[in-house]
Image (tube, rainbow, N blue to C red):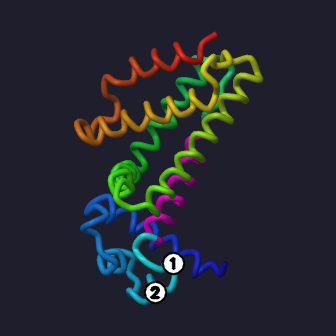
Amino acid sequence: MPKSREQKINRILQASLKILSAKGYENATIADIAKAANVSRGILHYYFSDKEDLVSKVLASSSSNLVQDSLKGVKGNSVEEVVDNMIDAFKKNLQKNPDFYAFLFEMWCAGRRNKKIKKELNNCSRKVVGAIKESLEIATAKGVIEPSPHGSSETAAALLALSDGIAFQLLNNHPENIDVKYWLPIRTMMLSVLKK
């Protein structure tokens, strides 16, 4: 893809994320997104067939970027180090990408009414769970964490649910304070699940 085309698409995706997280799916318009991306509505329609297509691509792109950022730091030589690295990666993502979590929750609501969005949300969730599962399996193979009696997929899904739930609590109650009291109980829960 030519660089200017790729840059334009990325600019549209980033602007869409901001507008959708601020206004919500129902209230955000193509005109709002085009204006925020500094492109014409025609250009936006050239790259994306409709609002659903745009939202699906924003969801896929942003969750993929977030997973890559998160899993870079999820390593360690002890279960404590793995858990601390997972929490640190999550905190960094919350600080760096607060719009993503607002957008994610908005897409969950929109997905309850829209099959295409729900399908993309489920695809993204499977990818994230798969990436967490892979990290857990690598740590298990190294003998750092105990194999889960419930299965690595289920453990990965539970960890994702925990992180998304905490993101919701922080966005709803403490958006300015990422270092709230939640982290110690989260660490304890994660250690109880992963510790030998």
Q: Position of residue 14 (x, y in %)?
A: 44, 66
Q: Nearer the viewer, residue 115 or 103?
A: 115
Q: Is residue 150 above or below residue 129?
A: above
For the N terminus, give its image quadrant. Answer: bottom right
Q: Is residue 58 magenta?
A: yes
Label 1 crowding class (10 Å Cα cut-off): few <14, some 14-19, many 20+? some
Q: Is residue 165 above or below residue 52?
A: above
User: Which dot marks residue 43?
Assistant: 2
Q: Is residue 119 above or below residue 15?
A: above
Magenta stretch: give its range: 53-73
What type is the residue that disc 2 sits on? Ile
Q: Main secondary structure of the magenta part?
A: helix
What type is the residue that disc 1 sits on? Lys
With 169 as the anchor, is 104 left or right in this view? right
Q: Is residue 196 magenta?
A: no
Q: Nearer the viewer, residue 54 or 34?
A: 54
With 56 as the anchor, is 67 left or right in this view? right
Q: Residue furthest top?
A: 196
